[in-house]
Image (cartoon, helix red, strand yellow):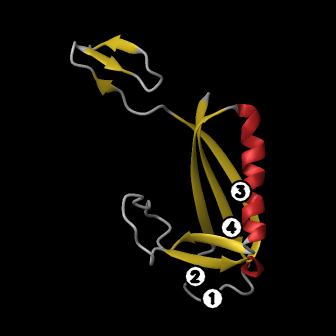
Amino acid sequence: MKNFFLRFTGHVNERIRPEGFPKEVYVDYVLQDCPDEQLKSLIQVYLDQFVKQNGMVVNRKQAEMEDQSKLVFNQKMYVPMYMIAFITVGASIIADLLPQEVTDGKVQLGDGKEMPLQ
């Protein structure tokens, strides 16, 4: 199974975009150990979420990654669906987690396999 990075891009309608508002807004997801067959259905689930909430909840600072270890309520904003002209989706395969060193001179890879430390 693979790990995927999904980016949903909401393209803001230029006719009603407020001054200083970004042209695109992003919602990112990381899927771990996701089978290829399940990827399409998960993308549809996330798109349905945007429809149900009638918009996208995005980071205020689009270029920064969100620190999941902190509970902060002022980092998000709601962009209503009437401001979004269309949504595109990009999916990229990402590598496993970085290897962890094991005490006997071997490293453990993300899938649990061990290899000698070189």
Classify the position of the N terminus by image quarter: top right
Question: Mark 1: which secondary structure?
Answer: loop
Amino acid type assigned to the residue bearing label 4 in the image: Gly
Residue at image position (71%, 32%) is 36
Q: Nearer the viewer, mark 1 or mark 3?
A: 3
Where does the image place residue 44, in percent across and percent down from the top left? 78, 52
Per the rendering, the mark at residue 9 is none
Specify the quadrant of the image occupied by residue 85: bottom right
Residue at image position (38%, 32%) is 98
Marks 1 and 4 in Cβ contact (< 8 Å): no
Rounded to the nearest angstrom, the CA distance separating label 4 from label 2 is 13 Å
Rounded to the nearest angstrom, the CA distance separating label 4 from label 3 is 13 Å
Amino acid type assigned to the residue bearing label 1 in the image: Pro
Where does the image place residue 108, in percent across and percent down from the top left? 36, 20
Q: Name the residue under label 4.
A: 10
Where does the image place residue 40, in percent across and percent down from the top left? 77, 43
Per the rendering, the mark at residue 18 is 1
Marked residue nearer the N-terminal end (3 or 2): 2
Amino acid type assigned to the residue bearing label 3 in the image: Tyr
Marks 3 and 2 in Cβ contact (< 8 Å): no
Q: Name the residue under label 3.
A: 46
Q: Nearer the viewer, mark 4 or mark 3?
A: 3
